Amino acid sequence: MTKILMVCLGNICRSPLAEGILKSKVFGFKTSIDSAGTAGYHIGEKPDRRSIGIAKKNNIDITDQSSRKFVIEDFDKFDLIYAMDNSNYDNIIRLARNESDKSKVKLILNEIFPGENLDVPDPYNGGDFGFKNVYKMLDEACGIIAKKLNENG
Ligand code: 4NP
């Protein structure tokens, strides 16, 4: 079973969407998918209403999620840790204890654009368009991740 963690800054906008979208695309019980934030600003909160809204429009319910902070033990619990942007990536890498921890951390948009190290833009201070854009990017990236999981387990 591949265990995947999606990570952004607040765990209320981007990574809850990534979690919900990926869960909607994998079949059976081959995976365990969770999300976390590198900052603790919103611990215990539900996803942002704009993330809930765009997910709902796409028939995905993320209202049962609640924000938590990334912890060192996540390196032991997960096989793949997808950072939403370069700043999150650097924050996670800084916490890594060894090369094995580091090797688990990937930038999610490299699934679509390998090696380009692009960011999923932080939509928190923008309007609904930003969330629509984030949804589109994550839907495409998670489609690629899910295809690999569904093929390889
Ligand atoms: P997220 O978005 O990292 O995609 O969850 C943000 C949420 C909250 C804040 C920043 C980004 N904040 O500064 O509170």
Image (tube, rainbow, N blue to C red):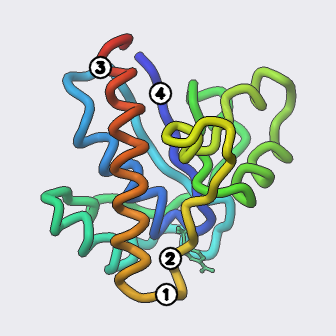
Find disc 4 in the rendering and name its residue. 3
The quadrant holding residue 132 is bottom left
| Position of residue 98 in the picture relative to residue 137 (left or right) | right
Closer to the eye: label 3 or 4: 3
Mark 1 residue type? Gly
Q: CA distance from mark 2 to mark 4?
A: 26 Å
**Residue 92 coordinates in the image, percent (x, y):** 74, 47
Crowding at dot 3, Cα within 10 Å, few <14 / some 14-19 / many 20+, comes out as: some
Crowding at dot 4, Cα within 10 Å, few <14 / some 14-19 / many 20+, comes out as: some
Task: Please say if 29 is above or below 36.
Answer: above
Q: CA distance from mark 3 to mark 1?
A: 34 Å
Q: Which of pointers 3 and 1 lies earlier in the amino acid sequence?
A: 1
Crowding at dot 2, Cα within 10 Å, few <14 / some 14-19 / many 20+, comes out as: some
Task: Please say if 118 is above or below 44.
Answer: above
Q: CA distance from mark 3 to mark 4?
A: 13 Å
| Position of residue 97 in the picture relative to residue 9 (left or right) | right
Q: CA distance from mark 2 to mark 1?
A: 5 Å
Find disc 3 in the rendering and name its residue. 150
Q: Quadrant of ligand 1?
A: bottom right
Tell me if label 2 and label 1 are in contact, CB under 8 Å: yes
Closer to the eye: label 1 or 4: 1
The kind of secondary structure element at disc 1 is loop
Crowding at dot 1, Cα within 10 Å, few <14 / some 14-19 / many 20+, comes out as: few
Mark 4 residue type? Lys
Find disc 1 in the rendering and name its residue. 126
Find disc 2 in the rendering and name its residue. 123
The kind of secondary structure element at disc 2 is loop
Mark 3 residue type? Asn
